[in-house]
Image: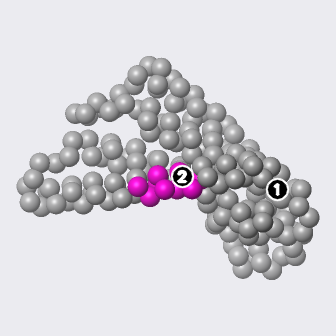
Amino acid sequence: MRQMTKVLGWLENALLQLAVVAMIVITVIICYGIAARSFHWPGLPDDILIVRQLMVATIAAALGYASAERAHIAIDIFYNALPAGVRKACNLLAWCIGLVAFVPLTVWAWDEFASSFARGDYMYGKLKLQEWPGEAMFFVGLLVMMLRLVALVVHDARHPGPVDGPLARAEK
């Protein structure tokens, strides 16, 4: 389990770095688009399509990292008032519900990626960009998130007592 957690941690950090780079590229594209309109420069072809694909990658890439850090939205005022055992039960329930939601979503993302890759689908626009790279990134992000949820369920079920911090700290 520790080896899987280390590999997942490495993948999550790599995907997080990729998300940061994607956000920087998005910022540059948008700023250039604004400047191009203001100064009558030529625009970047398919900038909207590129930004759309990068946004999907940015969001999907960060999901696993956010789960490992247990950084999802919670109502802390009520959650922190609960006894430790109830908080642990709530965590386990949340991870299980997440798995119920993410397993079919990940399977769907795989089907979309595989069929788009096999057909060689292209997006409309001047550059005729292929669809599969964005769909691949979405699938990888969901897969890492799903694996992290499995690790969280196993970890929280095996370790007695409250588990409220990031998984990385809980494993040490």
Where residue 78 appears, x then y in whole percent? 75, 77
Give x and y (percent) for residue 163. 81, 67
21 sits left or right of 114 in the view: left
Q: Is residue 42 left or right of residue 84?
A: left
Q: Amino acid at mark 2?
A: Ala
Local packing at callout 2 (Cα closer than 10 Å; few below 14, some 14-19, many 20+) is: some
State the CA–CA distance, disc 2 to disc 1. Answer: 22 Å
Q: Amino acid at mark 1?
A: His
Residue 101 in the image: above or below residue 37: above
Confirm whether the magenta stretch covers residue 17: yes
Dot 2 or dot 1: first in sequence order is 2
Residue drawn at x 63%, y 46% is 144
Which element is circle 1 on? helix
Q: Is residue 65 magenta?
A: no
- Point out the stretch of residues depicted in magenta: 12-21
Residue 14 numbered mark, or none: 2
Give x and y (percent) for residue 159: 88, 61
Q: Nearer the viewer, mark 2 or mark 1?
A: 2
For mark 1, what is the residue? 155
